[in-house]
């Protein structure tokens, strides 16, 4: 079994998120893509976030027609901040034996990885898929990791990835990154302008029906 773990605030989920998830599922032949909305992200404590139940419900509406997509509320079950290391350990402990995990994140987030809790352990626990921008190319991890840690990973041209010491790999993949952001969508909602074709229809209907008016 191969599972993708796609975490984020998803405030709201939009077509860019869904397209990236679909492409990664195809590229790595994942059996399951799990969206994991964050309750409270440690590095984003400076801004308000829509209530978890709204973000979770919008994700469910956005993914209900794809049988390989699912939602986990694991991070909302915690009393404090959401740490990726704890989430990955949860899935390692609660998945069938032999399941491969693919942790999905954006290029900017990956370049901040040293700020994450127990980041070295996290990188060793599962595969990483870094969603990159057009034109981005890397043949070294020296710009992200300290030299001693970067030296543990060797570039494999056959698989186009960096293989680590625990048989896990780091993949950089250029996807169809639609120029859509949750921040821009929230601004449009607040201004009363259209978000049609930026989010799935059921998500747009939910926002309008609930009268969501972001901060």
Image (tube, rainbow, N blue to C red):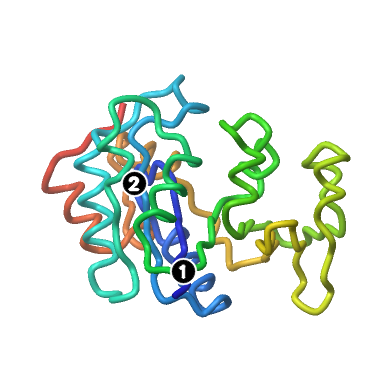
Q: Pointer 2 and pointer 1: residues touching (CB < 8 Å)?
A: no
Please tell me which residue is depicted at 40% across the width and 66% down the height of the picture: 33
Vertical position of residue 12 compared to residue 45: above or below? below
Element class at badge 2: loop
Image quarter (top left, top right, bottom left or bottom right) of the N terminus: bottom left
Of tags 2 and 1, the one toward the viewer is 1
The residue most toward the left is 209
Q: Which residue is mark 1?
A: 99
Please tell me which residue is depicted at 34% across the width and 30% down the height of the picture: 49
**Residue 147: quarter of image:** top right
Vertical position of residue 45 compared to residue 158: above or below? above
Picture coordinates of residue 157, whole percent (x, y): 84, 74
Q: Which residue is mark 2?
A: 12
Upstream in sequence: badge 2 or badge 1? 2
The residue most toward the top is 46
Picture coordinates of residue 165, whole percent (x, y): 74, 56
Q: Residues within 10 Å of mark 1 (few under 14, many from 20)?
A: some
């Amino acid at each position: 079994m191969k599972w993708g773990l796609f975490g984020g605030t998803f405030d709201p989920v939009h077509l860019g998120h869904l397209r990236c998830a679909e492409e990664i599922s195809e590229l790595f032949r994942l059996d399951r893509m799990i969206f994991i909305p964050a309750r409270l992200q440690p590095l984003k404590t400076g801004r308000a976030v829509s209530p978890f139940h709204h973000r979770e419900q919008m994700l469910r509406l956005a993914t209900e027609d794809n049988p390989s997509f699912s939602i986990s509320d694991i991070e909302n079950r915690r009393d404090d901040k959401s740490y990726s290391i704890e989430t990955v350990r949860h899935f390692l402990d609660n998945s069938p034996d032999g399941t491969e995990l693919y942790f999905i994140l954006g290029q900017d987030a990956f370049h901040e990885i040293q700020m994450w809790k127990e980041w070295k352990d996290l990188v060793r626990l599962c595969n990483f898929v870094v969603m990159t921008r057009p034109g981005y190319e890397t043949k070294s991890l020296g710009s992200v990791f300290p030299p001693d840690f970067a030296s543990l990973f060797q570039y494999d041209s056959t698989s186009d990835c960096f293989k680590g010491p625990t048989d896990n790999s780091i993949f950089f993949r250029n996807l169809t990154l639609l120029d859509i952001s949750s921040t821009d969508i929230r601004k449009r909602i607040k201004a009363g302008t259209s978000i049609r074709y930026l989010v799935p229809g059921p998500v747009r209907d939910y926002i309008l029906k609930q009268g969501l008016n972001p901060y």
